[in-house]
Amino acid sequence: MRTSKRTMILDAATRVIQRAGVTAVTFDSVAAEAGLTRGGIMYHFPSREELLTALHEHEADAWDALMARTAGKSADEATVDERLSAYVRVCTESATRAELQLLLEAVSTPEHMSPWTSVMNRWAPPVDPAAVTQEDPEAVWRLVARLAADGLWMHEALSDQPLSPEVRATIAELLARRTPL
């Protein structure tokens, strides 16, 4: 299947962010990365804000699709534990600086954060702090798994010495199974 120009532009913008950060996303930088003209970018995205909003939606959708592939089913079809397991596995396998920078940028702009929040709430719903008690070890473990996955994702996005695939797989398995190895 042929990639649409819109997708090609969004993928090019992601590469710009990966290399130089969100502030480097301009019509000129994305056009150069995509091999298109500035007008070609503006045809699909009349403003930088529209480009950024579409970029957040595009990346969050890709993240959602990756979790569905990992789970082997949609979030609606998966149990709470299957969703959390997919979330953990994706966090331990996929982390880019572009994703991290987009998420950090999104925090201050509700329309940018909305697609990310939607995906996160679908796959790793927030844990009610009142439910995290010694009487409910499953709730405690879900919170620990979520925090560990988020921390590992952050480590991999920021580190100049990422963990080996074997170590990441071991951690993912431990968290997904919710039992010691």
Image (cartoon, rainbow, N blue to C red):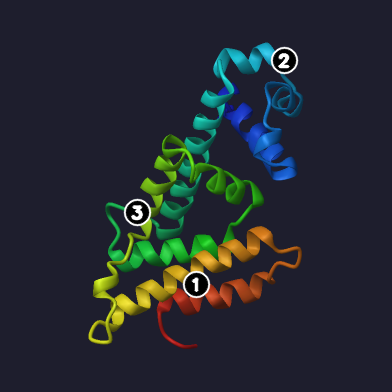
Q: Name which of mark 1 and mark 2 comes first in the sequence.
A: 2
Label disc, if present, on residue 37 of the rendered structure: 2
User: Element at badge 1?
Assistant: helix
Rendered location of residue 131, percent (x, y): 24, 74
Q: Name which of mark 3 and mark 1 comes first in the sequence.
A: 3
User: Element at badge 2?
Assistant: loop
- Mark 3 and mark 2: Cα distance apart in space: 38 Å
Is 43 rendered above or below residue 152? Answer: above
Label disc, if present, on residue 148 of the rendered structure: 1
The residue pinned by badge 3 equals: 121
Q: 25 or 124, which is in the foreground?
A: 25
Quadrant location of the N terminus in the rendered image: top right
* Residue at image location 29% in from the left, 77% down from the top: 132
Q: Name which of mark 3 and mark 2 comes first in the sequence.
A: 2
Q: Is residue 63 left or right of residue 42?
A: left
Is 78 rendered above or below residue 130? Answer: above
What residue type is disc 2 on?
Thr
- Mark 1 and mark 2: Cα distance apart in space: 43 Å
CB under 8 Å between discs 3 and 1? no
What residue type is disc 1 on?
Ala
